[in-house]
Structure formats: C-alpha cells, structure tokens
Image (cartoon, rainbow, N blue to C red):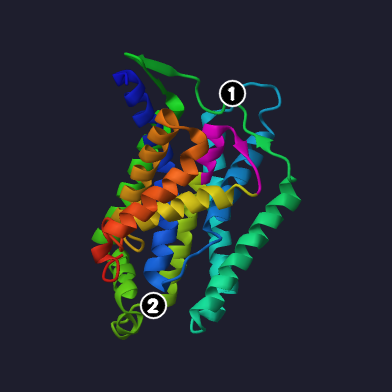
Amino acid sequence: MELSTLLQQLVNGLTVGGIYALIALGYTMVYGILKLINFAHGDLAVLGAFIGLTVLGGQLGGGAPPAAWLVALAFIAAVLVVSLAGVALEFTAYRPLRHAHRLSAVVSALGASMFFENGMMLIWSPQTRVFPSHILPDITWHLGGVVLTFTQVLIVFSSLLLMLALYLYVNHTRFGTAIRAAAIDQDAARLMGINVNRVIISVFILGPALGAIGGLFIGIYYREAIFNMGWLYGLNAFIAAIIGGIGNIPGAMLGGLLLGLFNSLAAGYISSSWQEAITFGLLILILLVRPTGILGERVAEKV
C-alpha cells in the first residue's frame, strides 16, 4: 500500500464525505424537530443540481467557461428554489399529518419523493444530463503523488464552512435556541412563547438549502445528473446521519465525513462494485456497537 495512494483516497473521501454531510444535515434537522424521516430530501438535493444546470446551461453552448457571477447565480437559484420546495413540502405533505399516526407521515414522505422524482423526469427528461467540465477553473495541484483539484478544494472547504456556520447558528443564536427548544419539547416551547410553526418552517428552509448545494456539488464533481439519483445519494446521506446519530447536527457532519472516507477507501482497496454492500456492513457494525449512532446519546435531547 503506497502512502500516496492512501492520501489520494482520503482526499477523494473527504470530498464525497463533505457532500454526504451537507445532505445528511437536512435529514437530521427534520428528524430532530418532527421525529420524521424526510424521504424526499435526496430528491430535493437532485432538484438543486437540475436548477443549477439550467441556470448555467444557457451560457455554456460556446464552450467558454462561465463567469464567476453566473456560477454564484446557479447556486443562489438552486438554494432559493429548493428552499421554497421544502417549505411547500412541509405545508402540503407533513403539516396536515403532524398529529396523525407516524406511519401516515412516512407514506406521505415516500409519496413526496416519487412526486419530485417523476416531476424532474417530466421537466428534464429521463436521460442523464451531463455537466460541462469547465464550470469551475481547471486547476490541479500535484503534492507528491496526490492529485488535488480546485473542485475538490472548493467542495471540502465550502462544506466545512457551511457546517460550521449551521452549528454556530443553532448553538449560539436566539433562533437557534428556539430550534433546540422545539426539538426537546414542542408544547413546552409554545408555553415559552416560541412560534413552533415558524421554527419548523426554518428547518425546512435550512435543510433543503444545504441539500441543494450538496446536489449541485454532486453534479459538478461527477459531471452528471439524472432524475432518480436522489435515492442513491439520499440513502447514503441517510446512512451517514444514522451513523453519526440521527437528530444530532455534529453527528450528521461526522457521519457524512466518515462514510465518505470509508466509501473511498473501500472503492480504492477492495472494489467499487462492493461499495454499497460495504457501506451497509459499516452501518450494521456501528449500530451493533452504538445503536443510537456515534454521537447518539444526545439525539433525544438536543438538535
């Protein structure tokens, strides 16, 4: 095992892990507030990839790299549209069932996932849409035997920055305190004057916004988007949230990064065809040792 090969896999793993962590935060925030698995969250992330590609698409016909402001506009448009979709999802699919049996909400979440998936197929066709290779500067660094691209650096640092910002917002702001209070006990939060509905809406804005950025990163990094890939990436992000301790924000971050590293090492040293089986094996192993996830002790009490 060469050291350069190991370091290369770690770089690749951190890149993918950062994307998983961004998407996993949406799962864990919704679960922390509503104790609900939002199965449509992976599809919202993919919606972000399609929105970003649509914004960029009109300017890439000549093969010239898009201007920086256009790339920024693609991310802003993806965040805004997917956040609105998240709010609409909460109003139509989850709020009417908030006091119903939990199974009803699960079925509604699965239905919402199918709605978004088929909607994207109708709008953008069932064919795989290819992202151009020159969206971001084609800069590559060679550090020893390790190849590091500008895209990887951007994804890793942006993901870490966004995760840090969310953590500080939830733990060091007044509204973040309201989110944590609502996650512990919604009735008690209402008695303290907290508008719980407003808190829930904010969660359905923040989570999908981060998912949209993660989805656009997927499209730029793998250079493709297809209507049904939300299931695969959503499942990996969901597993990441469980590994870290679903309902726990630092746990989702840690789980995403660990899963990305593990996937990359498994693909590099064993086989990419065994990657999914190995991922589930890791999940089972961790749940056997830590049934509530690595940071799961705080799940029921803090978000």
Q: Main secondary structure of the magenta part?
A: helix
Q: Which of the two labelled residues, at mark 1 and mark 2, occupies the earlier sequence position?
A: 1
Q: In the displayed structure, would residue 148 be above or below residue 270?
A: above
Q: Is residue 233 visible?
A: yes
Task: Count residues near mark 1 (Cα–Cα under 10 Å), then give few for <14, some for 14-19, many for 20+.
Answer: some
Q: Would you say residue 219 sits in the magenta stretch?
A: yes
User: Which mark, residue 198?
Assistant: none
- Image spot of residue 67 (x, y percent): 56, 28
Residue carrying label 1: 65
- Image spot of residue 43 (x, y percent): 58, 54
Q: In the displayed structure, would residue 4 be above or below residue 230?
A: above
Residue at image coords 43%, 32%:
270
Residue closest to the eye, 280 or 112? 280
**On the picture, is 180 further left or further right than 158?**
left
Q: Would you say residue 5 sits in the magenta stretch?
A: no
Q: Amino acid at mark 1?
A: Pro
- Image spot of residue 168 (x, y percent): 27, 54
If the image is split into quadrants, where does the N terminus sit?
Answer: top left
Residue carrying label 2: 195
Residue closest to the eye, 275 or 127? 275
Q: Amino acid at mark 2?
A: Asn
The magenta segment:
215-227
Q: Is residue 73 visible?
A: no
Q: Secondary structure at mark 2?
A: loop
Q: Secondary structure at mark 1?
A: loop
Q: CA distance from mark 1 to mark 2?
A: 46 Å
Residue closest to the eye, 183 or 298? 298
Residue at image coords 49%, 44%:
276
- Image spot of residue 12 (x, y percent): 41, 31
Residue at image coords 47%, 60%:
205
